[in-house]
Amino acid sequence: MQIRPVLSALRKHRVATLLIAMEIALACAVLCNACFLIANRVQQIQIHSGVDERALAAIKLTGFDEKDGVDLNARVLSGLATIPGMRSVSVINAVPFGGSPNNAGITTDAAGKQFAGVVNFYTGGPGSFKALGLRLIAGRAPHDGDYQPVVHFVPDDALVWVSQSLAEHAWPGVDPIGKEFWVGRPHFRVAGVVANLARPSPGEGGPSTIEWSVFVPSLPGAHFAGTYLLRASSEELPRALRDARVAIAKIAPDAVLDTTASQSVASLRETFFQQDRAMAGILLGVIAAMLLVTALGIVGLASFWVQQRRRQIGIRRALGASRGDILSYFQTENFLIVTFGIVLGMLLAYALNLVLMQHYELPRLPLYYLPIGGLVLWGLGQLAVLGPALRAAAVPPVVATRSV
Amino acid sequence: MFGYYLDLALRSLKRNKVLTALMVLAIAVGIGASMTTLTVMHLLSGDPLPTRSGTLFFPQVDPNPYPDGPSLPYDMMDYRSAMDLWSAHRADRQALIAHGQLKLIAPQVNLPPLMAQVLSTTSEFFPMFEVPFRYGHGWSAQDDASRARVAVISSDLNNKLFNGADSVGRTLRLKNSDVRIVGVLGAWRPSPQFYDVAGGRFDDGQTGDFYGRPEDVFLPLNSSSDINPVGFNFFTCWSMPQSDATLQTSPCVWMTLWVELDSAAKVRSYRQFVADYAAQQKSVGRFARADNTQLRSLMGWLDFNHVVPSDVRLQMWVAFAFLLICLFNTVGLLLAKFLRRSGEIGVRRALGASRAAIMAQCLFEAGLIGLLGGIGGLLLTLLGLWLVRRQPVAYADLVHLDAAMFLATFALAVATSLLAGLLPAIRASRMAPGLQLKMT
C-alpha cells in the first residue's frame, strides 16, 4: 500500500483529519489516566489486612458506664463463648476496616525528638492475637504475662508486635526486635514482627501508611471494654454472628449495640471500599462511553468520505484496482489519522497525569500504559472504519461511467 | 426567516437520520455526564447559609505550650481558650460547640435505647445559624448559666420517637439524667454541615461525611458536661493526658467557637482581640506562640477544609473531558453533514443568499441538534442523579436537579452544539457558488 496518495488526499481534508486526530488524542489521554486511576483503586481495594477476614467478626457495645466495663467484659466473654460454633471471643479495641482507630505519633527516642510517624495501636486482650490469625515473621508470640492493664489508651510500658511495613519504616535495614519507641511518656519495646496488619481505616494517612499498626497485648478492664472479636469457621460465622447479636440483648441489656460496627470483617471490608468500587465503576463506564463515541465519530466521518469519493473509487476500480486495494486504502487512511492522534495523545496523557499528581495522591503514570492505550485506539479505529471501508470496496467500477 | 431555517434544518436532519441520531446521542451523553457531576458539585460547593455566611467567623488560637508544634493552629480549641474567648462576649453573637454521644431512652416510648449524636452548644447557636424550629424554641442564655436540663431535638429524632408529634415538654433520659425537650427542629439540612467541619485537610479528600445530617440532640454545654463529663469527642492532644485529667483540664483540643460579626470594623477589632488574647496567654506562659491565630470566614473555613470530596471533583473533570470528546465528534460529523450539502448551498448562494445567511442557517441546524441533545441530556442527567442518590454517600439525599441546573443543562447543550457548529458553518458559508453548481 502506498502512503503518499493517502497523505495527499488527507491534505484536502485537513480540518476533518485534525478533528478526528484531536478526538483520538483526547480519548488516548483520558483512557490512559482513567485506567491508571482504576488500577490504583483496585490496588487499594485488594490490600492485605493480615487477619483472617473470613473467620472474624466484631461486636461493638456503647452507652454503658465506664465503671461497668469490667463486669460487661466478663458477661460478654462468657455469654458469647457458649454460642455453638464460636471458636473464640476476646476483647479488642478495633478491627481492620471497622474504623475507630487509636492513632498516636511515635518517637524512637525518649526525648520525643525522632518522630517516626502517626501509627495505630490495636489493643488486644488474651486470645486476640491468635484469633486474628496474624502471621509472625520474627520474634515470638505474646505470652500470658505480656498482657498489661490499659492506663491511657494503651498500657504504659509494654511489649508490642509491629507490622513489617512499620518496622521497615521506623528502623530501616536493622533487626526491629528489641527496638523501643515512645508516645510521650508511655514506652514500648518490639517483641515481634507480623507480616501484615492494616489500620482500622486503611489509607487515611496516605497509601504508604496503610499498615502502620502496632499490636499491644492488653488486659481488659474499665478503660478497655465494649468491642469484642469473634472467631468461628468461615461457614459458621454468619450464623454465629447473628446469634451473638441476639444474645447481646440479654447479656448486656444496659448497653447499646452499634449495629453498623457489629459485622463480620469481610462485610466491614466490603462497606469500607464501597465508594472506591463505585468510583472505579464510574470510570469504567466513562471509558466505555468515550470509546463508543469515538468509534461512532470515525464511522460517521469515514461513511461521509466514502460517499463523497464514490466516483473516484469507481474510477480506481475501473482502472484495475481490486476490492482489497480500496479496503486497504481506507484502513491505511484511518491508521495514519489514528497514529497522529495517538502521538499527540501520549503527550497529552503524560501532561494530564502531571496535573492529577498535583491534585490527587497519585503516582506517576507508568510508561507502559501509553503503548497499551495506543494499541486499543488503533484496534478501535480499524474496527470502526471496517464497515465504511467494506462499503467502499463494494462500489462497482461502473460508477465511473455515470455522472454522479 | 426563522420558520424557513427551521424547515430547512428539519429537512436536513431527516435526510440522514443515522447521522443526526449519532450527533444528538453524542451531545446527550456528554451533557448528561457533565450535568450530573456539575449538579453534584454545585450542591456540595454551595453556600450553606447564603443569607449570613459573610458575617460568620471561626476564630482559632494555638494553645500548644511547645514552640515546635504544628505551623497552623489546631482545628479546634482547648476548653480554657474557647471559654475565655466565648465569655468575653466581644462578638455580636457567639456559640461554643462540642460533640459527643449519649445513650438515649424515651420513657413511655417502646424503643430500645439508642446512642444519640449530641451537639453541646450555647444558646445563640440557634438564632446565629438561623436554625428553623418546628415546635418550641431554643434555650436562653439563662439556661446556659443555670445548667438547665433542657434539650432541642432534630426532626429526624422527633419522627422516630414521637411520630412527628409536638414533643415539647416531654422528657428524655440521657445516660442517667432526665432532660426536658424545649424545641424540635424543622427541616434543616445545611450542605455541608458547616458548623461541624474540622480536620478536612487530614482527610485525603474523603470529605463526604461533612454532608451528613444534623445531630439528634442539642444540649446546653454546661448541662451536657454535668450529664457526662467524659462524653465529648476530642480532636487531638498535644501531649499525653494525665490519667486523672478531665477533658476540661486535659492538653487536648475538642471545642470550636463560631462568632457573628456584622461589619468589617467589627471583624478587624475581633481579629485584634484574638491576637491580644494569644499575646496575653503567651505572657502568662500558657501559649508558646502568640502569632499563630486565625479568624477565617465561614466560606474561607470550608475552602481551607477542602469540603468538596476529591472524588466528586475528579468525576466532574472526567465528565468534562468526555464532553470535549463529544464536542470534537460533533464538529467532525457536522462538517461532513454541511459539506455534503455543498450543491444545495451553492444553489442558495447563486440565488443570492449571503454568506451570513448560509452561516445562520447552518448554526440554526446545529442549535436544533443541541436542543434535541439537551432534552436527551436532561433525561440522562436525571438518570445520573438517580444513580448518585443510590450511592453510599452522606450527601445522597441532597442530590436533586434545581431550576438553575435545569436551565444550565439546555444552555450547555445549545452552547456546545453552536460551538461545534461554528467551524463547519464557516466552512460551508465560504463555498464559492459557481464551483458547486458546475460540479453537480
Image (spheres, grey):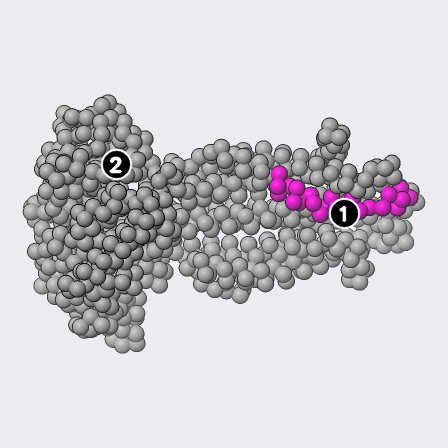
B250 with respect to A263 (left or right): left
Compute the Cα span from label 1 to label 2. Answer: 62 Å
Percent position (x, y) of residue B178?
A: 11, 33
**Mark 2, secondary structure of its residue:** helix
Q: Amino acid at mark 1?
A: Arg
Q: Nearer the viewer, residue B245 or A165?
A: B245
Percent position (x, y) of residue B118?
A: 21, 40
- Which disc, if any, is residue B427? 1
* Residue found at x 57% / y 43%: B30
Q: Amino acid at mark 2?
A: Phe
What residue did someone put label 2 on? B126
Q: Nearer the viewer, residue B338 or B85?
A: B85
Around disc 2, counting alpha carbons within 10 Å, would you say few (fewer than 14), some (14 to 19), or many (20 or more)?
some
Q: Chain of mark 1?
A: B
Q: Main secondary structure of the magenta part?
A: helix
Q: Is residue B167 above or below residue B39?
A: above
The magenta segment? B414-440
